[in-house]
Amino acid sequence: PAGQAGAAPAHGPLLAKDARHALHPWADLSTLGKQDALVITGAQGVEVVDSRGRRYIDAIGGMWCVTVGYGREELVEAMAAQARRMPYFTPFGDVANEPAIELAAQLAALAPGDLNRVHFTTGGSTAVDSAVRIAHLYHAAMGRPEKHHVLSRVDAYHGSTYLAASLSGKEADRVRFHYEDRWVHHLESPGHDPDNSPLSADDRLTGLLDGMEAAIARIGPENIACFVAEPVLASGGVLVPPPGYHRATRELCRRHDILYVSDEVVTGFGRLGHFFASQDRFGIVPDMITTAKGLTSGYQPLGAVLISDRIADALAGTADPGKPVFSNGFTYSGHPVACAAALANIELMRREDICGHVRDVGPYFIDRLRELRGSPIVHAVRGDHLMACVECRVPGESGPTPRNMALAQRVDAYCEAGGLLVRPYENLCIMSPPLVVDRAGIDRIAGIMAGALARAEADLRAGTVAAG
Ligand code: PLP
């Protein structure tokens, strides 16, 4: 049973306070002050319960992050024990704490290649920011300070700080904020719709690589610091690049001395069946990896940049003699309680062979979802292991049109009514369930989703799905 519904505070007053005082991340500003929040008050296994006592299977995994499931006492115990022993002390300069030291060593052992140096951050955005700053510092240390431009991609999502948001390439997210556009460049998206593309995978790959080479030539390789790339673009719509893309882009970067930063905030920690997907799934050893989310299974906020020895040694060996300080890092970098959660999480993942489980059930998840393509309102289903999305469309209409988005919202609402939480984005229903989900749980997800699609299709026929 999920959570303790009985212990939940009264629903009405809670919602009134939320509506009056909270500005949620990624809130719909047109409903600010009137928001009718879903208040999650309890959770167990792969289920959550809300303040009205309704239960849901959590196909969002918190927010891509709850991997080993809810209610894992050993993570809670590890956090409590560390909080009792020593909750916090500065990580700055030559000061360290035991869990952070131990976690850095374990991450180095899990990471591919010579990524043996770990810089802790507070989450994914700050990990991405830090990776770009380290790339800048590296090239400056090598005597090439002009190498500071950054390559990202359309449809990427790298976070919500100024720099990470600038790297993000989702057009719909670009609003009246300011973005760094002088030295951040967006390459073509690996593409939304391989199943419905007239091009072969090889042709798509060639097009993407030609585009990347052209961008490098235009900007000048002597000006480019790094390429930041999610192995599978997550929030942009679970976009899986064509086979060979990772190795080829890695090679292009190597040829032009552009550092390759693999943003594994979502794909790391088991979601694709490995602790890190870069090498084990896609055959590349990046120069840096960013990680967060599943690092603690969402039990604590924590992020990290894993850095190659080559980069770290260069930074150390050529530090500015007058100012040798690495002036990057956060009050809560390597927070002891968060690191204790991550250590317990890694131990649990190893003991229960969570990655092996994902390799086992991941293809079943994708197969079950692919069956939904029989619905006339499903345009595409795509994904890899336990990250997937169902793209909805009014027959004959493709992309995030107002009607397609309204339809997807309807699907999402029916999923919620049926006891399933998916993540709505434009005309997509995105799913990343806890990695401990079993076949029965996957059947439930697919079954509720199928029912929701059927009801939304009936509404469409009845003419009750209005755009906007
Ligand atoms: N990178 C990727 C690939 C992400 O999906 C996210 C968050 O969804 C981030 C970075 C930002 O992480 P955070 O929200 O912890 O700052």
Image (cartoon, helix red, strand yellow):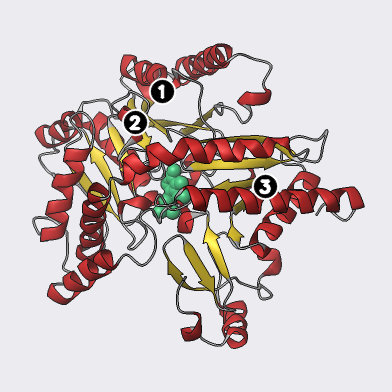
Q: Earlier in the sequence, mark 1 or mark 3?
A: 1
Residue 19 or residue 227, whichever sits in front = 19
Residue ID at (39%, 59%): 69
Residue position for label 3: 426
Of helix, strand and loop, which one carries label 3?
loop
Q: Is residue 300 visible?
A: yes
Q: Give amino acid for label 1.
A: His
Q: Give amino acid for label 3.
A: Glu
Q: Position of residue 88 (x, y in %)?
A: 19, 70
Residue position for label 2: 278
Q: Position of residue 398 (x, y in %)?
A: 76, 34
Most extreme residue toward the front, as rendered?
440
Residue ID at (73%, 49%): 453
Q: Is residue 448 above or below residue 323?
A: below
Of helix, strand and loop, which one carries label 2?
helix
Q: CA distance from mark 3 to mark 2?
A: 28 Å
Residue 377 or residue 235, whichever sits in front = 377
Q: CA distance from mark 1 to mark 2?
A: 8 Å
Q: Is residue 234 above or below residue 222?
A: below
Mark 2 C-beta closer than 8 Å to ligand 1: no
- Is there CB contact under 8 Å for labels 1 and 2? yes
Could you tell whether 186 is left or right of 294 in the image?
right
Q: Is residue 155 visible?
A: no
Q: CA distance from mark 1 to mark 3?
A: 27 Å
Q: Is residue 393 above or below residue 284?
A: below
Residue position for label 1: 246
